[in-house]
Amino acid sequence: MKGEDMATPSDNSRESIPKEKAANIKKGLLTWKKDTVFTANIRGHAIHFDAGGNEGCTPTESLLMSLPGCMAVDIVLFLRKMQAEIGKFDIETTGEANPSPPKYFRAIHMKINIAGKGITPEKLERAISLSQKKYCSVRHSLREDMDITISYDIAENA
């Protein structure tokens, strides 16, 4: 495909995009460094990719961590609205890739480890559900046949 065939707006064409649509356009720049090493720059933040995993994460590893990253933001915001106080929060994530190309993720399991005050299973399950079913953009960008499971461990204090 030639560059001019691609439907990517340039900086100059942004003016012709209606304001309501321009707010939904995300842009980044991927730059080749050497071999299979690249740097992605999004809004001034760099992410390093390396297919060999020596100088950065592999692209699939970054995808694997994008899901819990997106859900974590939602969950923390929802729990705060539910008057919970979070002292500790992490998500252990494991992905099972298809054994042959394309090596997409067939399954992802996340285990939420959370501690604080006022965090109940009901509140946490509600926050997880809202994120998965409505708000997590990464979840809604993934394959529908992917098996995503979530477990959790709640401790009273951090």
Image (cartoon, rainbow, N blue to C red):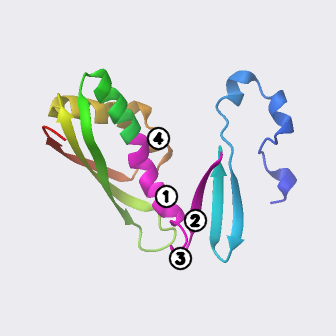
Looking at marks 2 and 4 on the same chain, the residue that comes earlier in the sequence is marked by 2
Q: Amino acid at mark 3?
A: Gly
Q: In the image, which residues are magenta?
A: 44-71
Q: Which residue is mark 3?
A: 52
Q: Residues within 10 Å of mark 1 (few under 14, many from 20)?
A: some
Q: Is residue 157 magenta?
A: no
Q: Judge left or right: residue 22 versus residue 93.
A: right
Looking at marks 2 and 1 on the same chain, the residue that comes earlier in the sequence is marked by 2
Label 2, label 4: how far apart the Cα atoms are: 23 Å
Q: Amino acid at mark 2?
A: Phe
Label 2, label 3: how far apart the Cα atoms are: 9 Å
Looking at marks 1 and 4 on the same chain, the residue that comes earlier in the sequence is marked by 1
**Residue occupying the point 54% across, 62% down:** 59
**Residue occupying the point 43% across, 57% down:** 64
Q: Which residue is mark 2?
A: 49
Q: Residues within 10 Å of mark 3 (few under 14, many from 20)?
A: few
